[in-house]
Image (tube, rainbow, N blue to C red):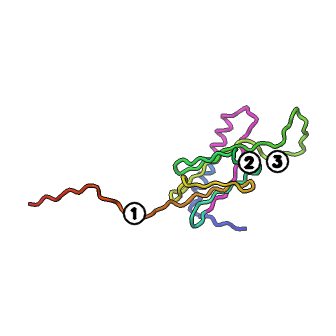
């Protein structure tokens, strides 16, 4: 399966990864000593003719455990993926642990031509889908509020 990437966006993609990495490290330092860790939240981001679409796989996470915040040209996804197995008094003997649990946070820079305040979010079978519409650039008339009369000589 092949995917089209805009070659001009390499710098923006790199910058977003660096910001995410910095946020993860900051969070880990602030919560040092806690058992809970910050987990990765991989995303797919693509454009359609009408919108920018962001997809995140969040199996086992309910909508109550996710915060989506639009601020300026940024959208922040934050939440928590909880372990469904309770290890009460050490009664579980794990053979392998590959799934990750804990808090996640992801900050997404939205290009200027999109309107983060108009974002629609939905969950479909453990997949979060954000649809960010294009800004509406509808032509409109601008009224003249004041007119100065010309002086005649």
Which of label 2 and label 1 is nearer to you?
1
For the magenta stretch, what is the residue range?
A: 20-46
Residue 138, relative to residue 86: is it above or below?
A: below
Q: Residue furthest left?
A: 153
Residue under numbered circle 1: 140
From the image, tell me which residue sits under label 2: 61
Relative to residue 84, is residue 141 depicted above or below? below
Confirm whether residue 20 shows in the render: no
Please, what secondary structure does the residue beneath circle 2 have? loop
Report if residue 7 is visible in the image. Answer: yes
Residue drawn at point x = 70 percent, y = 54 percent:
123
Instruction: Name the secondary structure under disc 1.
Output: loop
- What residue sits 53% from the left and 61% below the top? 134
Q: Mark 3 near mark 2, Cβ–Cβ under 8 Å?
A: no
N-terminal label among 2 and 1: 2
Query: Alpha-carbon distance for marks 2 and 1?
Result: 44 Å
Decide which of 124, 51 is in the foreground and name it: 124
Q: Quadrant of the N terminus?
A: bottom right
Mark in the foreground, 3 or 2: 2
Q: Which residue is mark 3?
A: 98
Q: Position of residue 131 (x, y in %)?
A: 61, 58
Q: Name the element at disc 3.
A: loop
Q: Quadrant of residue 145?
A: bottom left
Q: Is residue 1 left or right of residue 7?
A: right
């Amino acid at each position: 399966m092949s995917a089209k990437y805009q070659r001009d966006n390499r710098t923006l993609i790199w910058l977003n990864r660096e910001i995410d990495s910095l946020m993860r490290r900051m969070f880990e330092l602030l919560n040092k000593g806690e058992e809970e860790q910050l987990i990765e939240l991989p995303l797919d981001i693509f454009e359609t003719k009408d919108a920018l679409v962001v997809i995140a796989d969040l199996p086992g996470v309910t909508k109550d455990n996710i915060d989506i915040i639009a601020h300026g040209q940024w959208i922040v996804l934050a939440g928590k993926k909880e372990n469904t197995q309770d290890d009460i008094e050490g009664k579980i003997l794990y053979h392998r642990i590959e799934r990750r649990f804990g808090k996640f946070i992801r900050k997404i820079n939205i290009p200027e031509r999109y309107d983060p305040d108009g974002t629609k979010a939905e969950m479909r079978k453990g997949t979060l889908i954000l649809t960010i519409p294009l800004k509406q650039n509808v032509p409109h008339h601008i009224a003249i509020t004041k007119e100065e009369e010309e002086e005649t000589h």
